[in-house]
Image (cartoon, grey):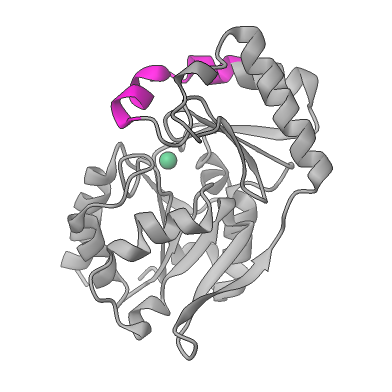
Amino acid sequence: MKKVLAFDIDQTLNVAKTPITDDIADLLVKCLDYFEICPISGQKFDQFLIQIVSRLKDPTPEQLSHLHLFVAQGTQYYRFNVEKNDWELVYNYPLTDEQVAKISETIEKSAKELGYWEEDKLQPGDEIIENRLSQVTFSALGQKAGTEEKYAWDPDCKKREQIVAKCKEYAPEFDYEIGGTTSINAITPGMNKEFGMTHLLEELKVEKADILYFGDMTQPGGNDYPVVKMGIDTITVRSHEDTAYALRGILGVI
Ligand SMILES: [Mg+2]
């Protein structure tokens, strides 16, 4: 039997950038009794708390000790310290200030040249480019835009593919991955989900064959593809409904 269930977040556990449903929350709590549960995503720690942890209904400290948060594609790892009854940072690999500045300039310039810099559509206080410590993230319409608006912006990824192509011309020393509905994550090469999953293997002392991974962007160029490439068993989902369906099946045969 698999020991670890690892999950992309956006479009795999939730509707991008929104908290998980009650259904997914209940299934995850049940899974914590049998598996190590590892969400891994480009998002920041506070979003893991808002979108996942705070949605779990009355998990015990013992259950939470089996939840492992691989933040910013696993370049930061948080686990639950039962004695302190709080989350603790186990490791962190941040970008340098120079790297953040270079990536931010590159993405802004590329998006502007293509006419995809939508500053006028931002809600007050929102921003298009966000420093997530281990990666810089472009969100075309900001973090606060509505879900429908986000879905409509680039459903076939074509706009983001053009931005990525330009970024690669201007700053080829970084990697650019398409994720979520309007996002591009810029990272230093190798700081993708392969990095996170490799550290997961070390931290949890498991083998690749012990892991089952769920993701929606498993195609080449997608931010879940590095996991597929590593040879980890992967389930490609279209939405959290597919994930719920698969989890019910797994829990049904335990
Ligand atoms: Mg996703």
Residue 16, percent from left and from top: 36, 39
Residue 252, percent from left and from top: 16, 66
**Relative to 224, does residue 70 appear above or below in the rendering?**
below
Residue drawn at the location 67% of the way across and 50% of the way down: 134
Residue 212 in view (yes/no): no
Q: Nearer the viewer, residue 205 or 182?
A: 182
Residue 79, percent from left and from top: 51, 74
Residue 2, quarter of the rendered image: bottom left
- Quarter occupied by the N terminus: bottom left
| Side (left or right) of 193 relative to 50 | right
| Side (left or right) of 134 relative to 58 | right
Residue 26, quarter of the rendered image: bottom left
**Relative to 23, does residue 107 appear above or below in the rendering?**
above
Residue drawn at the location 58% of the way across and 57% of the way down: 74
Residue 135, percent from left and from top: 65, 44
Q: Residue furthest right?
A: 98
Residue drawn at the location 41% of the way across and 35% of the way down: 144
Picture quarter with ligand 1: top left
- In magenta, the rendered stretch is 146-162
